[in-house]
């Protein structure tokens, strides 16, 4: 099968298929198919509440309980997950560690007005509001796979723009080597931030060349509609070749920095989470293999691909780097 580059997927392509998507998803309430997946009382992490397979919606369900799928696929020909999959099964610890409860707890989250401050080692620090984001950066549709470190994956039609366009506006200085991202800190709205076992706000980081790669997206929507709160509204990062926890949600601050930022998961469990977090079937998590994954709504497991299938686009970033050591 011809591999279509993810950025070749046009907005029209998504729009044309949206009608069949709407028809399919209207009829089914997915939440009844999904059960809470949290385990025990250890500190939940993107990996310690690994869901068991029965917690996932699978194609083995009865026909009337299986939403129609869209006709859209990723470049490997695999179907998109439907809107309900993407928006009812979430990791967003600022609200809760229960994936099935995020949508409900986040439903009143205020995402407008909103500003993203971009600064640090740049020539022209800037503050972008939502209007600036819509007007300055042309919004594109991108179909990407999302692979969570917990061993599940989805195919998601994002809407957004390359992070590189925003970084271009602020003009990074030559000593800027990394990009550090921060989520909103607002424990009144984000009740999970009262859980003091975690350092808040949520922080993530990329090397500057990773941030400038054409696949790295600031997403503002899914299926052509604005992001719902549980998905990281109004603007989140999407780095499709890295485990999902790198794709930080509800961003308010982006700083260009000289030193490697310490991400939230590096701070919580340094022995389990490194800075790179590239999807790699040959580098097991300390507590389990990463060789396979369960695609949501599929029965059984499929092999996990190096860099989540984006090797052609990103392997140049890691020439000469030991991927076992730099996990
Ligand atoms: N960003 C913030 N601020 N807080 C989070 O808890 N969870 C991460 C990532 N971004 C998280 C976050 C994890 S572990 C994953 S797998 C993805 O978001 C999940 O994105 P989704 O809920 O849209 O599928």
Image: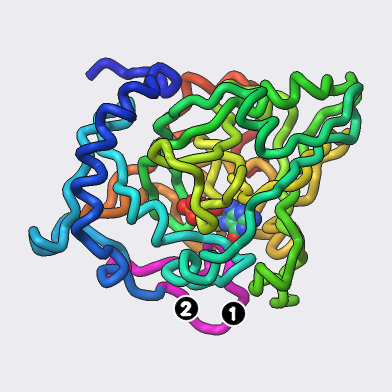
Give yes or no for contact between labels 2 and 1 (Cβ–Cβ under 8 Å): yes
Residue 257 image position (x, y, % from top left): 86, 35
Residue 198 image position (x, y, % from top left): 72, 69
Which SS does the magenta portion mostly show? loop
Quarter in which the N terminus is drawn = top left
* SS under mark 1: loop
Q: Which residue is drawn at 72% across and 38% down?
A: 129
* SS under mark 2: loop
* Picture disc at residue 42: 1
Taking the magenta stretch, the answer to whether it contains residue 264 is no
Q: In the visual, does 113 lie left or right of 75?
A: right
Callout 2: few (<14), some (14-19), or many (20+) C-alpha neighbours within 10 Å? some
Report the coloring of the rendering: rainbow
Which residue extends farthest left?
63
Taking the image in four quarters, ligand 1 sits in the one at: bottom right
Is 48 drawn above or below residue 320 in the view shown? below
Residue 148 image position (x, y, % from top left): 47, 51
Q: Residue at x 26, y 68 (%)?
A: 33
Along the line of sight, the residue nearer the viewer: 123 or 152: 123
Along the line of sight, the residue nearer the viewer: 199 or 15: 15
Is 272 drawn above or below residue 2 in the view shown? below
Callout 1: few (<14), some (14-19), or many (20+) C-alpha neighbours within 10 Å? few
Q: Residue at x 57, y 27 (%)?
A: 161
Quarter in which the C terminus is drawn = top right
Q: In the visual, does 326 lie left or right of 27?
A: right
* Picture disc at residue 39: 2
Q: How far apart are marks 2 and 1 (CA)?
A: 8 Å
Q: What stretch is highlighted in magenta?
A: 37-55
């Amino acid at each position: 099968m011809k591999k279509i580059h993810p950025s070749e997927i046009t907005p029209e392509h998504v729009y044309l298929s949206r009608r069949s998507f709407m028809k399919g998803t209207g009829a089914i309430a997915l939440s009844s198919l999904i059960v809470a997946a949290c385990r025990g009382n250890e500190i939940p992490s993107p990996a310690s509440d690994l869901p068991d397979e029965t917690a996932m919606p699978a194609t083995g369900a009865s026909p009337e309980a299986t939403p129609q799928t869209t006709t859209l696929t990723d470049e490997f020909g695999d179907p998109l997950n439907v809107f309900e999959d993407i928006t009812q099964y979430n990791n967003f610890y600022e609200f809760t560690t229960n994936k099935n409860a995020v949508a409900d707890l986040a439903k009143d989250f205020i995402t407008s007005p909103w500003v993203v401050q971009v600064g640090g080692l740049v020539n022209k620090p800037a503050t972008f509001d939502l209007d600036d984001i819509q007007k300055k950066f042309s919004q594109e549709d991108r179909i990407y796979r999302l692979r969570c470190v917990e061993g599940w994956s989805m195919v998601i039609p994002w809407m957004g723009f390359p992070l590189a366009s925003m970084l271009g506006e602020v003009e990074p200085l030559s000593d800027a080597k990394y990009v550090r991202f921060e989520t909103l800190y607002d424990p009144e709205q984000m009740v999970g931030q009262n859980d003091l076992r975690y350092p808040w706000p949520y922080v993530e980081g990329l090397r500057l060349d990773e941030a400038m790669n054409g696949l790295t997206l600031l997403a503002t929507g899914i299926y052509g509609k604005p992001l719902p709160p549980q998905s990281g509204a109004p603007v989140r990062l999407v780095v499709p070749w890295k485990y999902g926890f790198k794709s930080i949600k509800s961003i308010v601050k982006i700083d260009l920095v000289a030193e490697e930022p310490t991400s939230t998961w590096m701070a919580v469990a340094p022995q389990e989470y490194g800075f790179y977090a590239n999807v790699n079937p040959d580098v097991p998590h300390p507590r389990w293999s990463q060789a396979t994954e369960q695609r949501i709504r599929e029965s059984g497991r499929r092999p996990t691909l190096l860099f989540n299938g984006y090797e052609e686009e990103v392997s140049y970033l890691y020439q000469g780097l030991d991927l076992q050591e730099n996990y």
